[in-house]
Image: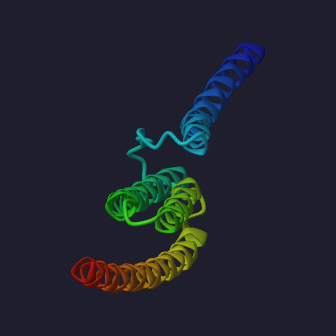
């Protein structure tokens, strides 16, 4: 009878250990799979675990981090779309302006790729906005230079028309 009781207790201990192990490893395995998807750029899924233990807290923090990353991605996408729209309007002015806008768009696309490092993303965004400001200042300077060229060409054209008119009158 002692062996029977020992066998039953051992069997119950094995079943209990398996259940505890499964209750720990299953949520962690789901979280690892979601982290792998997030590393691949898929932020569409969040982990679900209603427990309030350490694993539940990790999962909750992971979900918060994913929501923050989604927000950053949305902000970056909005910034990229706004910059691309402005770049299209400005690109007709000159080739130099077009290249500057393209550089800004590429820089902002790089920001979008770097969202997996949330803390680093904030400082990089500031750097990219400074680059954008420099690009806009550069575009403004180029437009002023082009305007000067156009004014000079207009004055030259007006002088040429007056000279042709004078020549026609003398002839």
How many labels, in total? 0
In depth, the one of 113 and 160 nearer the eye is 160
Residue 121 located left or right of residue 10? left
Quadrant of residue 144 in the image? Answer: bottom left
Considering every residue shown, the one lying at the far right of the view is: 3
Coloring applied to the structure: rainbow
Residue 63, above or below 130: above
Quadrant of residue 74 in the image? Answer: bottom left
- Residue depicted at x 75% and y 18%: 2
Residue 8, above or below 77: above
Considering every residue shown, the one lying at the far front of the view is: 171
Q: Quadrant of the C terminus?
A: bottom left
In depth, the one of 106 and 2 nearer the eye is 106
- Residue depicted at x 57% and y 53%: 113
- Residue depicted at x 54% and y 77%: 131
Residue 51 is situated, as x and y percent measured from the top left of the image, at 42, 48
Residue 135, above or below 91: below
In depth, the one of 51 and 158 nearer the eye is 158
Q: Quadrant of the N terminus?
A: top right
Residue 39 located left or right of residue 47? right
Residue 166, above or below 116: below
Residue 96 is situated, as x and y percent measured from the top left of the image, at 52, 67
Residue 169 is situated, as x and y percent measured from the top left of the image, at 21, 81
Quadrant of residue 35 in the image? Answer: top right
In depth, the one of 94 and 12 nearer the eye is 94
Residue 14 located left or right of residue 34? right
Residue 162 is situated, as x and y percent measured from the top left of the image, at 27, 84
């Amino acid at each position: 009878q002692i062996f029977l009781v020992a066998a039953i207790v051992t069997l119950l201990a094995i079943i209990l250990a398996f259940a505890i192990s499964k209750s720990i490893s299953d949520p962690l395995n789901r979280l690892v799979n979601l982290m792998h998807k997030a590393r691949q750029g898929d932020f569409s899924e969040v982990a679900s675990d209603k427990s309030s233990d350490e694993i539940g807290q990790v999962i909750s923090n992971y979900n918060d981090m994913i929501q923050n990353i989604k927000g950053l991605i949305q902000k970056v996408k909005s910034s990229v779309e706004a910059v691309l729209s402005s770049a299209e309007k400005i690109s007709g002015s000159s080739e130099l302006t077009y290249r500057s806008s393209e550089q800004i768009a590429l820089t902002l696309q790089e920001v979008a790729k770097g969202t997996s490092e949330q803390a680093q993303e904030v400082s990089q965004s500031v750097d990219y906005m400074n680059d954008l400001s420099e690009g806009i200042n550069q575009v403004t300077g180029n437009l002023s230079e082009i305007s000067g060229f156009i004014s000079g060409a207009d004055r030259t054209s007006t002088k040429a028309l007056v000279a042709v008119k004078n020549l026609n009158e003398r002839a």
